[in-house]
Image: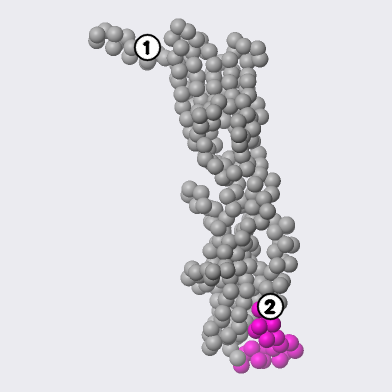
Amino acid sequence: MKLFSLIALCALASAHKITQLKVPLYADPRRAAELSCHFEMDDQKLHSVKWYRDTHEIFRYNPSQKPPIRLFNVTGIMVQGGECTADSCLVRVMPPPLATRAAYTCEVSTEGPKFQIARQAKHMTVVAMPEKDPIIIGAPKLVKPGEQLLLNCTSDYSLPPSDINWYIDNELQKPEIWQRTELSPPEVGGLRASWRVLRVSVPSGASGALRVRCEAILLVEPPVVRDAATIITIYSRTQLSKYVSNSGFSASPSLCFWIITLANSFIYNTVIRSL
C-alpha cells in the first residue's frame, strides 16, 4: 500500500502544472481585457486548454482539432479571440457594461491514458475609474450672513457610478430628504456620471469663510475617492454694504437662491457633456 502511495506522489511531482495565471484585478468595460495562462507539460502531451467564466466555458484550444480554437460567447460577455502555443494560452474578452465580479479559470488537460487536469482561477471585477475630479457648480466667492446657497457637485463618468458626499469645514453634511445622488443616462460601456445638490444656509452673524468640499466615491475595494473644494468668504453687514455699494448691484437672498437653482440645471447639462 505504501508503494502505491509513493508511486502516486511521484506521478504528481512530475505531472504538468500551470506556472502563471494573469487575470486583471479590474477591467474597463470600454476595452478588451487580456487573460493569459502559462503551463509546463513535462513529459505529458497537451490535450486541451479551456477557459471558464464562473462555471461557463468561454474558450477552448485543442491542437488535434480543426480549427484548434473555439469561442463560446455567454450572457454578459463577448470573447474576441485568442492565441495558444505549446506552453501558453491567451484570450481576449470584452467585459459586460455592469459592475460585476467573476472568476476566470484556466484548465489544462493531458492526453490519455492519464487524462490529468491542472486548474487555476482568479477573479476580475468590471470597473471604470473616474478620470477627472468632480466639479462644484453654483459656489459664489462672497456671501452675507443669512443667505442661502444651492450648490451642485457633478462627478466624472465611472462604473459603478460614484456616490457623493458634501463637507463644510470638514464636517460631513447629512442630506435632506430631497437631496440624493442622481445619475445621468448610461454612456458607452454603461458608465454614468452622478451629481448631488447641497443647500447651505449661512448663519446670521457668521464671519470668516466656509470651506466647502465634495467627494465622489467609487465603491470598490479599496474605494477610489476624488474630491473638489472651494472657499466661500462671508462678509459682515458693514463690509457687504460697502462691497455692494461699490459694485452698484444688490439682490435679495431668495432671488439669488432661485436664480442659482435654475442655473444649476442649465450648467449641469453643459458640464456633464464636456466631461
Q: Where the C terminus falls, by quadrant?
A: bottom right
The residue stretch that appears in magenta: 238-257
Is the Cβ of the residue at disc 1 closer than 8 Å to that at disc 2? no
**Residue 49 relative to residue 97: left or right:** left
Q: Main secondary structure of the magenta part?
A: helix
2 shown above or below 271: above
Residue name at image x 54 percent, y 28 percent: 56
Residue name at image x 58 percent, y 50 percent: 160
| Residue closer to the observer: 59 or 85 | 59
- Does the magenta segment cover residue 76? no
Mark in the foreground, 1 or 2? 2
Amino acid under label 1?
A: Ala
Q: Which residue is mark 2?
A: 258
Q: CA distance from mark 1 to mark 2?
A: 79 Å
100 shown above or below 4: below
Q: Secondary structure at mark 1?
A: helix
In this rendering, the count of numbered labels is: 2
Residue name at image x 57 percent, y 76 percent: 200
**Residue 88 relative to residue 259: left or right:** left
Q: Which mark is residue 11?
A: 1
Q: State the image quarter where residue 99 is shown.
A: top right
93 shown above or below 137: above
